[in-house]
Image (cartoon, helix red, strand yellow):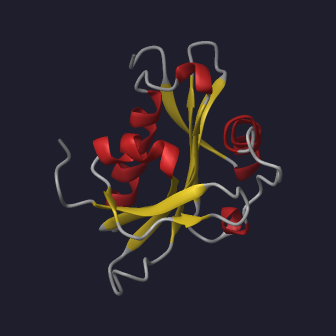
Amino acid sequence: MADAYRVVELTADETHPVRLAVLRADTVRKVVDFAEDHWPGALHLGVRNATDELVAVSSWIPRERATHPGVPAVQLRGMATMQSLQGQGVGAQLVEAGCARAAAGGAHLVWANARDAALGFYLRHGFEIDSDGFIEAVTELPHHVIVRMLDRPTS
């Protein structure tokens, strides 16, 4: 898979088509531009296939998690892999690359508001649930906050 897919840096705008196709396919609201996309230190990563098609995206925003005050942290937002490639390791490659970059930048924690439908993916990649469930306002879908300590090895 490493030859077929590569992780690349993107602009926030470049993430929008994949966010729309994956994250807003089953929602009423179609907004895919996040205010945090333009914060200082925001990093947008994607995965391109062998034909240079963008097939997955994620955004990494420097932001502390309230339950871990004082811990340098990054919020993962807008994580999306095209449906036809889900379960094939593309999203895992993207998460690991983003976590490595966050750690290299001094973060000790990555956190996200994860859709319940994706919890299994995140739990397999070293995240733990850090909140009671809630309905996210924009998507109106069930979510939990998840966290991953970057100094712990994943299984």
Question: In the picture shown, does residue 128 fall above or below 69?
Answer: above
Q: Which image quadrant is residue 45 in?
A: top right
Q: How many marks?
A: 0
Task: Determine whether, in the image, residue 40 is placed left or right of residue 90.
Answer: right
Of residues 46 and 87, the one nearer the viewer is: 87
Split into 4 quadrants, where in the image is the N terminus? top left
Of residues 101 and 90, the one nearer the viewer is: 90
Task: Determine whether, in the image, residue 142 is placed left or right of residue 96.
Answer: right
Q: Which image quadrant is residue 41 in?
A: bottom right
Measured as percent of width and height from the top left, residue 111 is found at: 42, 63
Measured as percent of width and height from the top left, residue 58 is found at: 56, 47
Split into 4 quadrants, where in the image is the C terminus? top left
Task: Determine whether, in the image, residue 89 is placed left or right of residue 78.
Answer: left
Please say whether residue 105 is visible from this viewpoint. no
Which residue is at 16% across, 50% downward?
153
Question: In the picture shown, does residue 155 fall above or below 132?
Answer: above
Measured as percent of width and height from the top left, residue 138 is found at: 73, 61
Please say whether residue 133 is visible from this viewpoint. yes
Of residues 91 and 13, the one nearer the viewer is: 91
Which residue is at 20% across, 46% downward?
154
Which residue is at 71% across, 52% downward?
12
